[in-house]
Image (cartoon, rainbow, N blue to C red):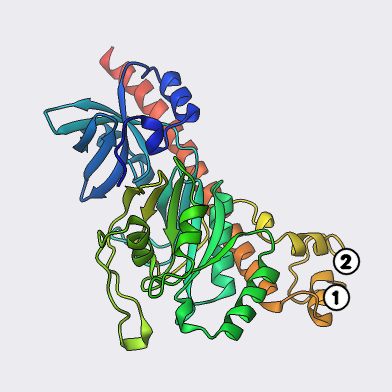
C-alpha cells in the first residue's frame, strides 16, 4: 500500500473541505474511515492510522444506520491517546450507494435499506462467467450506482473459463445492452485484463467492487495490491454458491494511488431509494413517448410502443421485464418514504405540543 503524506491521497477534495468549513470544523482534524467492525472503526489520515469510536451523543442522536460512519466516510476526529481517536462528526457525503433488501433484519422489519459504500467515484460491477452472470442483475447494479451519483463500470471475471468464441459473444451482448458503460474482462488465474484494470484506475479516486460471493472480488483486489492481503475462498459445491469470505468492508490504497473498497458479497440486489430509474433505461423511456397511454405500464396495454419494439425484436424483452420490476420497486419505496415523512411530521407536532404542555406544568 502507498505511504500517505497528504489527505488527497486518501481521496480528500474541495467538496469535503467546503463541507468541513460549513460545519465549523475548519480547525478540527479529519480522517477517512478505512474499516469498521462491531462499532469500532479504523481511521486514517496523513498523520497515521487509529482505532476510533463514536461519541455517546452521536449514538443517541442517530435515527438510522446511515447516521453512523461508514467505510469511505470522512470524519472529524479528536485524539484520545497515541493510537486512539473519537469521531465527533461525519462530513457531508459526496456519493452514496444503497440497496434495499427483503430479508428480515434483527428488528423484524423487512425491506430495510443498507449502505453499501460512500464517497465512491466508480463502482465496479463484478460478474463471473461461471455462475451468476446475468444481464438483468448487472442492470440493477447499474441503476443503484447511477442513482447514487456513482459511475458504473463492468468487470467480467474468470474469463479463463471461456473459449475465445464465447468471450466474443459475451462481449457483444454486453456492448449491446450497456453501450455507454466501460467493460473490462479479467482473470486472476492467468492475469488477463488485470493490468488493464489497474491502468483504468486513477490516482486519488475511490473505487468499490460490487457483486455476489464467489465472483472473485477479493482475488482481484489481491491481484491489484500484489499481495494476499484479503482471505479468499473457493466456490461451495452446493448450488455453486460462493462463500462469504469477505465479511466486512475495507479501504485500501494501491501502489499507483487508486483507492479501493472491497465489499462482502450480496445474494440479493434491490433498488437504492425512491427516484427515477430512467437513466438506466434510456431506450425504454424514449419508446414510452410513443405509447398510447401516458401511464402505460408496458405490460399489456394496446398501443404500447415498448411492447411493439419487443415484438419486432428491436428491444430485449428481458430488459423490459427488468424495467417493469424496478419501476414497481420504485413506486413501493416512494410510498414508504411518503409514509415515513408523514410519521415524522406527526411526531414533530406531538413533540412540539408535549414540550409546550410541559412548560405550562413547570410554570
**Residue drawn where x is 64% and y is 81% of the image:** 169
Query: What residue is shown with label 1?
Result: 302
Q: Is residue 182 above or below residue 203?
A: below
Residue lying at the far top in this picture: please name it: 363
User: What is the number of callouts on the image?
Assistant: 2
> Along the horizontal axis of the image, is 46 left or right of 40?
right
Mark 1, Cα crowd under 10 Å, few <14 / some 14-19 / many 20+, is few
The picture places residue 16, in percent across and down from the top left corner, at 45, 29
**Residue drawn where x is 32% and y is 87% of the image:** 238
56, 191: nearer the viewer:
191
Residue 267 in sight from this viewpoint: yes
Which quadrant of the figure has residue 8?
top left
Residue lying at the far left in this picture: please name it: 81
241, 354: nearer the viewer:
241
Quadrant holding the C terminus: top left
Question: Which sits earlier in the primary sequence, circle 1 or circle 2?
Answer: 2
Q: Is residue 197 above or below residue 73?
A: below
The picture places residue 302, in percent across and down from the top left corner, at 85, 75
Residue 332 in sight from this viewpoint: no
Q: Is residue 209 above or below residue 354?
A: below
26, 198: nearer the viewer:
198
> Along the horizontal axis of the image, is 270 left or right of 48?
right
159, 206: nearer the viewer:
159
Determine whether the residue tagged by mark 1 lies in a helix, strand or loop: loop
The picture places residue 109, in percent across and down from the top left corner, at 37, 60
Determine whether the residue tagged by mark 2 lies in a helix, strand or loop: loop
Which quadrant of the figure has residue 354?
top left
> Along the horizontal axis of the image, is 269 left or right of 288?
left
Query: What residue is shown with label 2?
Result: 292
- The answer to whether the residue labelled 1 contacts the one labelled 2, judged by CB atoms less than 8 Å apart, is yes
- Determine the CA span between mark 1 and mark 2: 7 Å
The picture places residue 298, in percent across and down from the top left corner, at 75, 71
Amino acid at each position: 500500500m502507498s505511504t500517505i503524506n497528504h489527505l488527497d491521497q486518501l481521496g480528500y477534495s474541495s467538496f469535503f473541505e467546503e463541507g468541513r468549513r460549513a460545519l465549523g470544523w475548519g480547525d478540527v482534524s479529519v480522517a477517512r474511515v478505512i474499516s469498521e467492525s462491531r462499532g469500532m472503526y479504523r481511521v486514517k489520515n496523513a498523520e497515521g492510522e487509529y482505532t476510533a469510536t463514536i461519541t455517546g451523543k452521536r449514538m443517541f442522536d442517530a435515527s438510522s444506520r446511515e447516521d453512523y460512519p461508514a467505510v469511505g466516510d470522512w470524519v472529524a476526529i479528536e485524539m484520545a491517546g497515541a493510537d486512539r481517536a473519537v469521531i465527533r462528526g461525519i462530513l457531508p457525503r459526496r456519493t452514496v450507494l444503497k440497496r434495499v433488501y427483503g430479508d428480515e433484519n434483527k428488528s423484524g422489519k423487512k425491506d430495510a435499506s443498507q449502505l453499501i459504500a460512500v464517497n465512491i467515484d466508480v463502482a465496479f460491477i463484478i460478474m463471473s462467467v461461471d455462475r451468476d452472470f446475468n444481464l438483468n442483475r448487472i442492470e440493477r447494479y447499474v441503476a443503484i450506482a447511477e442513482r447514487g451519483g456513482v459511475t458504473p463500470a463492468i468487470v467480467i471475471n474468470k474469463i479463463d473459463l471461456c473459449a475465445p468464441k464465447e468471450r466474443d459473444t459475451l462481449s457483444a451482448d454486453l456492448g449491446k445492452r450497456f453501450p455507454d458503460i466501460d467493460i473490462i474482462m479479467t482473470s486472476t488465474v492467468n492475469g488477463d485484463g488485470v493490468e488493464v484494470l489497474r491502468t483504468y484506475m486513477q490516482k486519488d479516486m475511490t473505487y468499490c467492487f460490487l457483486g455476489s460471493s464467489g465472483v472473485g472480488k477479493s482475488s482481484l483486489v489481491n491481484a491489484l495490491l500484489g499481495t494476499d492481503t484479503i482471505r479468499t475462498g473457493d466456490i461451495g459445491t452446493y448450488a455453486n454458491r460462493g462463500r462469504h469470505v469477505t465479511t466486512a468492508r475495507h479501504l485500501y490504497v494501491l501502489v499507483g494511488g487508486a483507492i479501493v473498497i472491497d465489499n462482502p458479497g450480496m445474494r440479493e440486489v434491490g433498488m437504492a431509494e425512491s427516484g427515477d430509474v430512467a437513466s438506466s433505461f434510456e431506450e425504454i423511456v424514449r419508446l414510452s413517448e410513443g405509447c398510447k397511454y401516458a401511464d402505460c405500464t408496458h405490460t399489456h396495454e394496446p398501443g404500447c410502443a415498448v411492447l411493439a419494439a419487443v415484438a419486432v425484436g428491436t428491444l430485449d424483452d428481458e430488459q423490459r421485464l427488468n424495467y417493469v420490476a424496478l419501476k414497481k420497486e420504485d413506486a413501493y419505496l416512494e410510498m414508504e418514504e411518503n409514509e415515513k415523512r408523514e410519521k415524522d411530521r406527526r411526531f414533530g407536532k406531538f413533540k412540539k405540543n408535549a414540550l409546550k404542555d410541559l412548560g405550562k406544568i413547570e410554570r
